[in-house]
Amino acid sequence: MGVRGLQGFVGSTCPHICTVVNFKELAEHHRSKYPGCTPTIVVDAMCCLRYWYTPESWICGGQWREYFSALRDFVKTFTAVGIKLIFFFDGMVEQDKRDEWVKRRLKNNREISRIFHYIKSHKEQPGRNMFFIPSGLAIFTRFALKTLGQETLCSLQEADYEVASYGLQNNCLGILGEDTDYLIYDTCPYFSISELCLESLDTIMLCREKLCKSLSLSLVDLPLLACLLGNDIIPEGMFESFRYKCLSSYTSVKENFDKKGNIILAVADHISKVLHLHQGEKKLEEILPLGPNKALFYKGVASYLLPGQKSPWFLQKPKGVITLDKQVVSMCTDPESKQEISMCTHPESKQGVPMCTDPESKQGVPMCIDPELKQEAPVCTDPESKQGVPMCTHSEIKQKLPIGTYPEFNLEALMCTNPGIKQEDLMNVEPEIKQQVTMVSDPEILKVARARHVQAESYLVYNIMSTGEIECSNTLEDALDQALPSQAFVYRPVRQRVYALLLGDGRGDASSCPTVKEWFVYSGNPLRHPDLVRPLPMNIPGGTPSLKLLWLNQEPGIQARRLDTLLACFDLSSSREELQAVESPFKALCCLLIYLFVQVDTLCLEDLHAFIAQALCLQGKSTVQLVDLQLDYVDPRAVQLGSLLVRGLTTLVLVNSACGFPWRMSDFMPWNVFDGKLFHQKYLQSEKGYTVEDLVEQNKSRLTKFHNLKSIVCKACMKENRRIISRRHWHSHHSGKWGREGSGSHRTSSGRSRSGQGQHCRDQGPGSRQHEPDQWRRHSSSSGWSN
């Protein structure tokens, strides 16, 4: 995360740029300097998750009550000294950072494998040195903070850019996070979350001005330094030879500094003594070995330029052409590459939609100027799958560009792509440009989806509708477990129906919907390409309602349509009456359990008992009681089941958002329905043969509710020909391992069994992996559950 080697350099080689500060004192100074202005800290929430998650137990699926309590204490501490907090979360992964995202996910896979190896060897949770944040932590943290009354925002691009922009434009006290990119941005002060002492409100401020002084650089040089060292956009190895050349000619090598520290000093020395001589006179590619990476390098430098900022490294003589006809602005990035970017404009818009033309294929992606012009919708071609995905445009949303173009169209990015563009020309263009290629054509619906996304009220909905691309990070899953399927496949049919709802325009015809690109982490997936997943038809009484009806209509009876749609996403319309009779917060949990047990044949009666018992017992326990709960040992299967349920709760957030919120979000917030240690305890007890009375801790009221919930789940499963039986009965009739997803048979939505490849069923063409609808219904082994 951030600039390669800079964190270590600051700590070991350049510690004087770190200053101990106190937030209470800083806030008082801010109020005296700006009367009437509330001291505000912008929080990069993704950097803070590890700091916030203080519960000792993390392996069992999350200690959500404890976590919520920790968040509440964090907010209260700052509120008590009059500091306002604004929380930002990553809303989507930018294309130019996808490779880095994949690299981290694959690294996480290796860490998870070591975690499960440790659990199997020691039957206990590993130490904090192997800590892995519980699944869904970022998603549920958003809702926890909103519940606590905090302003919580979800980014439309990489969150660090929006955090830095907000801090600069709103005269904030500072940024709280743990990312060396904040040392590069020219924005408000940067404070470390890892060094924060909550009791005293002391932390470390990292001063970029002192960093510049130590390196003999100016603030505008820092983006150049960051890209030469490597960051999330520029791979570290791209300029490795250049850095060593700088080191070999560097005459002030410090023997007491480490090699990385000396490299940073050497590169900074080269910038200050060599590159500065040519600044504004020569192009960067003439003074740096950019080679074929020129466009990427320019993009990397421009990514640090906040609104209104410009770089002296981009000032060059005019060569480009600007046409202000409200139709197309055409520039040539490089006369040798013959690659062209065209900006479609609209009178009311502020963003451009580039068209990148491949010089070899001579194909471009055409863009509609405005839906009212009735131009043909563009088609975005996946170079791997060679499949066209129909797109539409929306004139209010920022463009997310494909690899090879800029993540944001702004003045400086355009200047760096087209060195000859005059600043004054760009000032005339910017107000004209604001368009995006999207998967949905209705601007009103997109506006609602975008607003809910930005306000962190929904999950993945806007990503699906705007870019048709979503991702899900690692889950604590045992790659060697041959019994349980990955959560990526268990919940895929639900997502497929959501795709049909969001992209089908109320037609209910999934065949006409574009495929969605899924970057989901699961065992055996090298993440070289996304899975291309087709939407799945929905079966809703009365037909599939439009999004306008679900989202905007407030007439009586619409809430019932919303619920019908939600249940149809889980293919549980036949269980509507039974679920309606369940009290909150167990209604949503019951829905999820029915889906899980129909979907996964290797779940048994003991698992169902544990899930239900922990949810019921949780209601009567305090946070202190949950903290004090001790486990006899840790079971690897229970670890995976806990994560599987939590991922189900995040899926409920997606479905509820897409359907217009038929259920209260609080009903499937984990601190209301799930506790990792408590579930693990009930799982171990159930495995040992504890009676139901013991599982519910001899509470008669809970016992009645237990039998009621169990009956609803079992009856609903029987409608799908799924009889939930005890594992002991299974062992007495079967031998061998439990089934792995797709190793034998699975069921379609009609309940019919058919053989197939299950998890690994995909097209054989390179990179396409296009999945047929509803392949993932029932995961089982030929020798596994068949009842």
Image: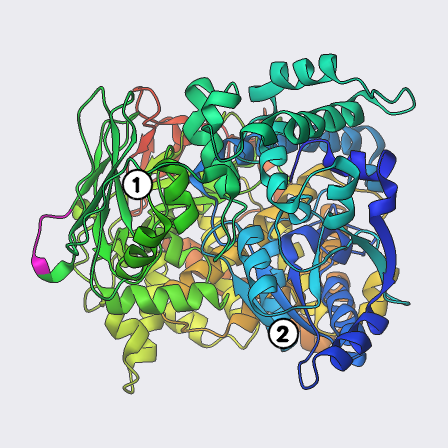
Q: Secondary structure at mark 1?
A: loop
Magenta stretch holds residue 375:
yes
Asked whether residue 323 appears in the rendered view, the answer is yes
**Quadrant that contains the C terminus:** top left
Q: 683 and 3: which one is in front?
A: 3
Residue that label 1 marks: 752
Badge 2: residue crowd in 10 Å (few <14, some 14–19, many ≥20): some
Three-letter residue code for mark 1: Arg
Tally of numbered discs: 2
Three-letter residue code for mark 2: Gln
Q: Is residue 38 left or right of residue 654?
A: right
Quarter of the figure with residue 755: top left
The answer to whether 677 is drawn above or below residue 761 in the figure is: below
The image's mark for residue 713 is: none
Q: Is residue 441 left or right of residue 102?
A: left
Q: Nearer the viewer, mark 2 or mark 1?
A: 2
Quarter of the figure with residue 341: top left
Asked whether residue 722 appears in the rendered view, the answer is no
Magenta stretch holds residue 419:
no
The answer to whether 18 is drawn above or below residue 501 in the figure is: above
Q: Position of residue 261 (x, y in %)?
A: 79, 27
Q: Secondary structure at mark 2?
A: loop
Q: Which residues are magenta?
A: 373-377
Q: 115 and 268: which one is in front?
A: 268
Q: Position of residue 646 (x, y in %)?
A: 59, 54
**Quadrant that contains the N terminus:** top right
Residue that label 2 marks: 150
